[in-house]
Image (spheres, rainbow, N blue to C red):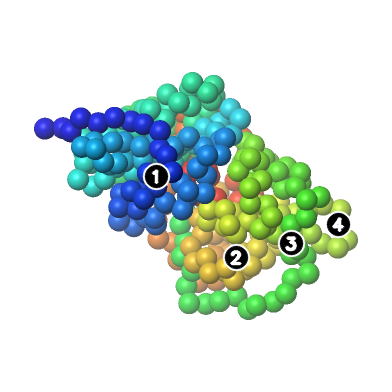
Amino acid sequence: MKASFSIEELKSNDLKYISALTPDGWYDVTPLYEMHLNQEYFFPIKLVAENKVIGVGELIINGKIGWLGNIIVCKEFRNQGLGKKLTERLIEMANAKDCESIYLLATPLGKPVYQRLGFQESGKYLFFKKGEMNFPEEKNESIIPFDKKYQNEIFDLDRKAMGEDRSKVLALHLKHSFVYKKADEDEISGFFIPTLGDGVIICNNTIAGYEFIKKRETFGMERIILPEECKETIEFLIQNKYTYFREATFMFLGELKKGNPKMVYSRVGGYLG
């Protein structure tokens, strides 16, 4: 017999329950929820049954675009359609806030659920893990710490890459970021934010992108996720002993955005591309 349940807004005192819900092979998403909680773009929900939190999910809204992510149901309550119920509620929330498009990255477990809800596929994100080889530590004069004068250029590059405005999320992490700017050039050609998700890197050329991948390693980040369109970067990773280990499917409802995925040298995360 199916348990009765309710879907409610997730609050700060619910964070302690998330870790126990985490599926095998996932990292603990509690810090992610904690980082974005109470921000104006972040809308988290919880699934409650038998007076306990048995599932969570979240919606991030960038203008007219909504991202669904980290939709998790406790193992003992799976195969009851509850992941579908969480997703339906998040879709309702996105529609109520006038989102024209809804995106997500689907695991193999979640993909059939999203297909039944009308989501369409549009490519893959590929996961790579660092091998034993390390890049030599070399100082690069073109990699410089963030200064507020670069803020709009960062937002501009990100919009060109992603086809949406993620500035509200990025803004919270800019003080920890780096930009790539050659002394003889007027504009930056890329940025790296080590504190946001998987360590996002967006660049308009491979020189900047590869240098930031090397920089990223110094922060102890051992996995990197890229859209499948990034063939040159994928080849660069393979040449440097990174190995492919899984993938996620990019899916959408509504209009499909127009960006330039080849500018992505490391994504933010499954909840934001």
Of marks 3 and 4, the one in the foreground: 3
Residue type, label 1 = Asn
Of marks 1 and 2, the one in the foreground: 1
From the viewer's perspective, is residue 160 above or below residue 95? Answer: below
Residue position marked by numbered label 4 in the rendering: 185
Which one is in front, 48 or 230? 48
Residue position marked by numbered label 2 in the rendering: 216
Mark 3 vs 4, N-terminal side:
3
Residue type, label 3 = Pro
Marks 1 and 2, how far apart at CA:
33 Å
Left or right of 166: which side holds 143? right
Residue position marked by numbered label 3 in the rendering: 145
Marks 3 and 2, how far apart at CA:
14 Å
Residue type, label 4 = Glu
Counting from the top left corner in percent of width and height, residue 118 is at 38, 27
- Residue drawn at (65%, 77%), measured in percent from left and top? 137
Counting from the top left corner in percent of width and height, residue 220 is at 53, 69
Counting from the top left corner in percent of width and height, residue 232 is at 60, 58
Mark 1 vs 2, N-terminal side:
1
Mark 3 vs 2, N-terminal side:
3
Residue position marked by numbered label 1 in the rendering: 13
Mark 2 vs 4, N-terminal side:
4
* Residue 1 image-quadrant placement: top left
Counting from the top left corner in percent of width and height, residue 55 is at 31, 41
Left or right of 159: which side holds 183? right
From the viewer's perspective, is residue 138 above or below residue 250? Answer: below
Marks 1 and 3, how far apart at CA:
35 Å
Mark 1 vs 4, N-terminal side:
1
Marks 3 and 4, how far apart at CA:
16 Å
Of marks 3 and 2, the one in the foreground: 3
Element at label 3: strand
Element at label 2: helix
